[in-house]
Amino acid sequence: MKEKIHDIELLITEAMSFDDEFQKYLDLGRELTAFYYEERYPPGPITSYSKEEIEEILEVAEGIIDKLKGGIKR
């Protein structure tokens, strides 16, 4: 995949073709993609997230970053 995209779910799905461990991040990818589009293109009601939800999302996102920094199994 060489195109630039903001769909985290799609990026994680692509990463899963190299390393099945990314499967555990798929739900977060869906949430982050939805959050991005809500913030970027706000046509509907604003979704609010609690501090706890944001902290949980950031924690999982940091796990994805750490996994990528550690390399992908081939």
Image: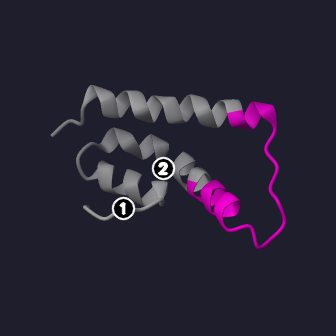
Percent across and percent down for residue 69 are 31, 29
**Quadrant housing residue 14:** bottom left
Residue under the point 47% across and 54% down: 8
Label 2 is placed on what type of residue? Leu
Answer left or right for 71 relative to 55: left
Disc sitting over residue 44 in the figure: none
Task: Say which residue appears at 69% left-offset and 58% top-offset.
Answer: 39
Quadrant for residue 21, please give it. top left
Residue occupied by mark 1: 4
Residue that numbered label 2 is attached to: 26
Magenta-drawn stretch contains 45: yes
Residues 36 and 57: in front is 36
Return the x and y of residue 45 as percentages of the image width and height.
84, 66
Mark 2 or mark 1: which is in front?
1
Helix, strand or loop under label 1: loop
Please state the extent of the stretch shown in magenta in the rendering. 33-54
Instruction: Give residue 70's position: percent from left, percent from top.
Output: 28, 26
Q: Left or right: where does residue 2 sit relative to residue 58?
A: left
